[in-house]
């Protein structure tokens, strides 16, 4: 049961004064908006103890003094990876013996809780400066790009919850089947723009520079035409050797496709990753039975992604650049993002 709201001393005194004036519990309830049961409790306490202040609460006193709590908070702020056992040992050396639960309660009272540390790319100072320069140079740019991704038959590796009794944890309805290596997978290339998704292509075999060249020719240009991107478009792909090969660069130059320079270790800013996630969530809901079915589901779900989702990713691109500039310290152009298994075209 949730803890009830405690009335301030002024309201409790007012209740007693109204009772002395001859008012009943319900009249006081209506006048002050407090429950009649609460009014009765306060009046009975006044009759018995001749006071309205609360008695001292029961329970053990806090073992950690305010000074000790300050020491704990200072260490956690300086060293966020400090464990509860480390803090227990520090207090023990200072003459205070507490449990790890007490440490947790103290930190929670100060607004801190234990969370899983987010994984981020390991960046050297040169990478950080490259990110900052990129963000400043392309702050007002819209985008277009492409990317690749691997989609597994049993591939959405995320925690799901079910309502069940404790003894039914292995009931078939309450479990999620898993297979080694995801039960097989397919590799996809895709692209999108603010106007919607472009083509989605399944990659057969090992992709090299020649295959990548063919994918762009057979899928990127038709996607650009279908999305009516027009002139001024910018193409984005990462620094994979297949993407930066001389033959690829020459083909892009002949097709008059301007390529956005992409710093190394920069995948978290590519909005196509969000679109791949969107696709995989919908695929998991469909539960394809085999790889042929998986490809069919991928194509169908990719085509169903609303243009509004794509437009929102492009719109939020500027926020990503601002976030980089903020943490480290693009004009009317159409962009296309692409990737293997993950391709994004944005406008």
Image (tube, rainbow, N blue to C red):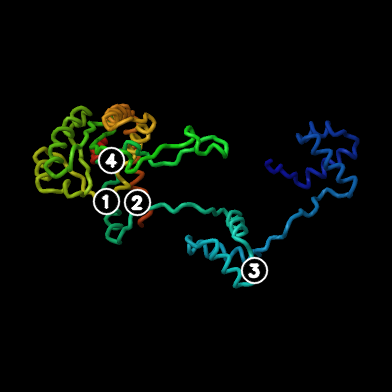
What secondary structure is found at the residue carrying circle 3? loop
Distance, label 2 to label 4, CA atoms, is 27 Å
Question: Pointer 4: what residue?
Answer: 150
Vertical placement of residue 195 versus 277, above or below: above
What secondary structure is found at the residue carrying circle 4? strand
What secondary structure is found at the residue carrying circle 1? helix
Question: Pointer 3: what residue?
Answer: 96
| Within-10-Å neighbours for mark 4: few <14, some 14–19, many 20+ | some
| Disc number placed over residue 324 in the picture, else none | 2
| Res 61 quadrant in image | bottom right
Upstream in sequence: badge 1 or badge 2: 1
Upstream in sequence: badge 4 or badge 3: 3
Upstream in sequence: badge 3 or badge 1: 3
Can the viewer see residue 242 in this picture?
yes
Which of the two residues, 11 or 79, is positioned nearer the viewer here?
79
| Within-10-Å neighbours for mark 1: few <14, some 14–19, many 20+ | some
Question: Pointer 1: what residue?
Answer: 134
| Res 189 quadrant in image | top left
Distance, label 1 to label 4, CA atoms, is 28 Å
| Within-10-Å neighbours for mark 3: few <14, some 14–19, many 20+ | some
């Amino acid at each position: 049961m949730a803890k009830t709201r405690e009335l301030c001393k002024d309201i409790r005194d007012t209740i007693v004064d109204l009772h002395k004036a001859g008012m009943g519990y319900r009249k006081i309830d209506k006048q002050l908006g407090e429950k009649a049961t609460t009014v009765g409790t306060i009046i009975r306490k006044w009759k018995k103890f001749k006071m309205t202040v609360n008695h001292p609460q029961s329970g053990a006193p806090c073992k950690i003094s305010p000074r000790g709590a300050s020491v704990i908070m200072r260490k956690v702020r300086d060293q966020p990876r400090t464990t509860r056992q480390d803090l227990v040992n520090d207090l023990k050396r200072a003459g205070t013996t507490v449990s790890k639960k007490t440490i947790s309660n103290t930190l929670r009272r100060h607004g801190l809780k234990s969370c899983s540390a987010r994984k981020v790319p390991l960046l050297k100072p040169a990478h950080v400066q490259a990110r900052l320069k990129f963000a400043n140079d392309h702050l007002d740019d819209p985008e277009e790009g492409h990317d690749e991704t691997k989609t597994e038959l049993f591939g959405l590796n995320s925690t799901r919850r079910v309502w069940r009794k404790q003894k039914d944890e292995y009931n078939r309805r309450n479990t999620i089947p898993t297979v080694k290596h995801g039960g097989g997978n397919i590799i996809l290339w895709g692209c999108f723009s603010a106007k919607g998704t472009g083509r989605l292509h399944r990659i057969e075999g090992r992709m090299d520079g020649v295959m990548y060249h063919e994918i762009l020719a057979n899928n990127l240009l038709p996607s650009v035409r279908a999305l009516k991107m027009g002139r001024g478009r910018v193409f984005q792909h990462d620094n994979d050797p297949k993407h930066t090969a001389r033959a690829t660069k020459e083909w892009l130059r002949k097709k008059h496709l301007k390529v956005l320079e992409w710093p190394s270790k920069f995948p978290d800013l590519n909005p196509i990753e969000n679109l791949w996630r969107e696709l995989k969530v919908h695929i998991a809901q469909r539960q394809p039975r085999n790889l042929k079915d998986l490809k069919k589901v991928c194509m169908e779900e990719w085509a169903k992604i609303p243009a509004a989702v794509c437009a929102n990713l492009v719109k939020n691109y500027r926020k990503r650049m601002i976030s980089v500039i903020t943490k480290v310290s693009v004009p009317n152009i159409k962009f296309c993002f692409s990737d293997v298994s993950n391709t994004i075209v944005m406008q």
